[in-house]
Image (cartoon, helix red, strand yellow):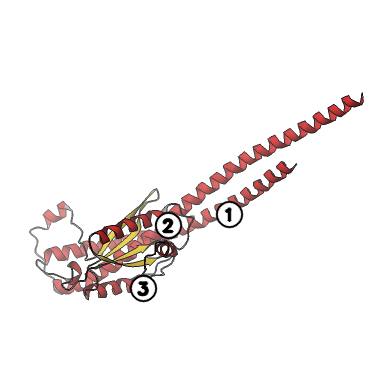
Amino acid sequence: MAQLREIKKRIVAVKTIQRITKTMQMIATAKFTAALARAKNSRPYTDTIRGLVAKVSAQAGDTSHPLLEKPARASGKELVLVIASDRGLCGAYNSNVLRTATRLLAEIRAGGSEVVLDASGRKALGFFKYQKQEVSNRHAVGDRPQYEVVEKIGQDYIDRYVAGEFSSVKVVYMRFISAARQRPEVMQLLPLSLPKAPEGAEAAGANANFDFSPSAPELLDELLPRSVKVSLYQAFLDAVVSENVMRMVAMKAATDNAGGLGRTLKRSFNRARQARITTELTEIVAGVEALK
């Protein structure tokens, strides 16, 4: 009897967990759909800005810009921003990002440079606190990154980089490729690396002459900071999309596992009940035989 009661309690607990994980899966699905729409809507603008910067820089000749080169008075410090999540239950999302960040930090320190560490997300803060690594700044962006918030972070990085406080700025985040594929990535935010133009476009524009109005340096003064901020914003959007799709997959797996465990427990309950009935019948038959 005690065994039956224990199995029944476990069945009730598993059903409760299954309802919770199913609800979390549905919430993650809704958040993933909204985050994916935001990321897709901003991607064409990000790619266009980068392509425009590449074209202007290529046609501007020897025109230079502080955001394209290391500062002349740069210190030996490199800034690393790690973008993780505020919550768990999202599979290997945080572990993959933090593992990539740990490798990057080790490589920078092995090269003799000092690291200034920034973090976004409570999981990153908790991890680095456990590792006894000092976090310089914590950026609270949330599940719905706002461009105005990210723009301030990007402008702060640009100002400090141009002032020579850092020799480079890197971002560690989870890049969203598709619903089935997400990859932890290290993006060099500063100095800005220009995208390569396609070979066909490069050949077509090799002999083209452009007149810039305003001048190329003025255009770069406007486009390069914007490219940095937009790239950082896209990284935050990709991170949110990746987090939600991985949580959705993790919660679906948990729901399926709870369903499988529930079926196993039901079989165990039926076997135990049948065994108890058989035992009681055997005892009754034995008692009747004893009375004869």
Residue 213 showing in the rendered view = no
Q: Residue at x 24, y 73 (%)?
A: 165
Is disc 1 placed on a helix, strand or loop? helix
Quarter of the image where the C terminus is located? top right
Q: Secondary structure at mark 2?
A: helix
Provide the residue designation for mark 2.
243
Which labelled disc corresponds to residue 20?
1
Please name the amino acid that badge 3 sits on: Glu
Q: Quadrant of residue 95?
A: bottom left
Real-space CA distance between mark 1 and mark 2, rounded to the nearest whole angstrom: 19 Å
Disc on res. 179: none
Residue located beneath label 3 in the image: 148
- Distance between the alpha carbons at the discs numbered 3 and 2: 22 Å
Secondary structure of the residue carrying numbered label 3: helix
- Amino acid on which the number 1 mark rests in the picture: Ile
Extreme-left residue of the structure: 207
Quadrant containing the N terminus is top right
The percent position of residue 12, horizontal first and vertical second, equals: 66, 49
Question: Above or below — where is 275 with respect to 260?
Answer: above
Q: Amino acid at mark 2?
A: Glu
Viewer-nearest of labels 3 and 2? 2
